[in-house]
Amino acid sequence: MITSPQNPKLKLVRSLQGRAKARHKENAFLVEGVRLFEESVKAKSKILFVLYDRSLSERGRELLNSLEDIDIEEVDGALLKSISDTETSQGILAVLANSPLPIPDSPDFLLILDQIRDPGNLGTLIRTAAAAGVDAVILPPNTTDAFGPKVLRAGMGAHFRIPIITMNWDAIKDRVQGLTVYLAEMEGDVAYTEANLKEGCALIIGGEAEGASKSARDLADAEIYISMKDETESLNAAVAGAIVLFEVGRQRKK
């Protein structure tokens, strides 16, 4: 049992919970809780190690017992709680290698999340993208790290079901060749229901605070908007994204 706060594994966990720079350096990220860990196991993610304490549920223990050749260690309960990123620890966390799923060879539905800074919104958009059948989520510079703890929790396991790739704008421009690029914008030119989303497309959602960057605007072929009553100032980025993403699916079912 791990009882020292100076244990190297605990130090690594603390660093991965912090800044994205540490996650990039280690090429690893942290999942906490039985549900997220289950999703990682289902996805056959590379598990570097697992830490648990006595409070782990029977469901969690059964999951651990089903694993083979995995580094699993028990940790003092107070210590595990001290490194937990949640208010109530579920008694388990795991460090995983960051190995993003590959983008399909010929994607026809991409989501570009530009300058999304709120972890909850980013995670929700990733979850919605997976549900709406998006081929891949692309993150330009200045979007928050998709593999931070709060983003992972909001994603509810979607990170293990959809490619999430960080790219600079030059690489994004190459990737969207052959697709129509739509930017969701309050003062857009075309209502989202009137845009032709049946064909291959990439949708850009900008951040709440600053909106879309100049690079995003330069890349867009058209700007689409969601009609709202005059009294409504704007929609949350995650809500606006969900509306347009499922409109793509609605049009393609016709």
Image: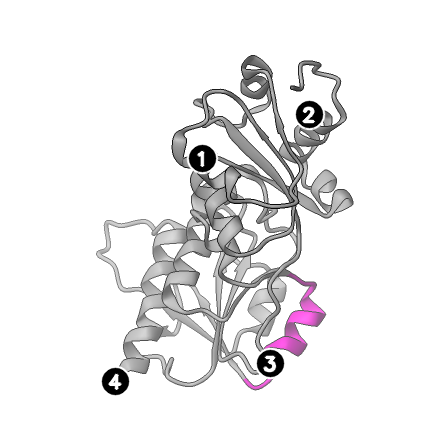
Task: Pick whichever of labels 3 and 4 is earlier in the sequence.
Answer: 3
Q: Is residue 163 above or below residue 16?
A: below
Q: For the residues marked 3 and 2, what is the alpha-carbon distance in whole angstroms? A: 39 Å
Local SS, label 3:
loop
Give x and y (percent) for residue 98.
66, 51
Asked if the residue at tag 1 contacts the one at tag 4, i.e. Cβ–Cβ closer than 8 Å, the answer is no
Label 1 secondary element:
helix
Q: Which residue position holds label 4?
A: 254
Please state the horizontal and vertical placement of residue 52, each as a whole percent of the image: 55, 27
Q: How far apart are the two marked residues, 3 and 1, measured between alpha carbons?
A: 37 Å
Q: Which residue is mark 3?
A: 105
User: Residue at the location (67% across, 78% down)?
Assistant: 174
Between circles 4 and 1, the one closer to the viewer is 1
**Residue 192 can be seen, yes or no:** no
Chain-order first, disc 4 or disc 2: 2
Residue position for label 2: 10
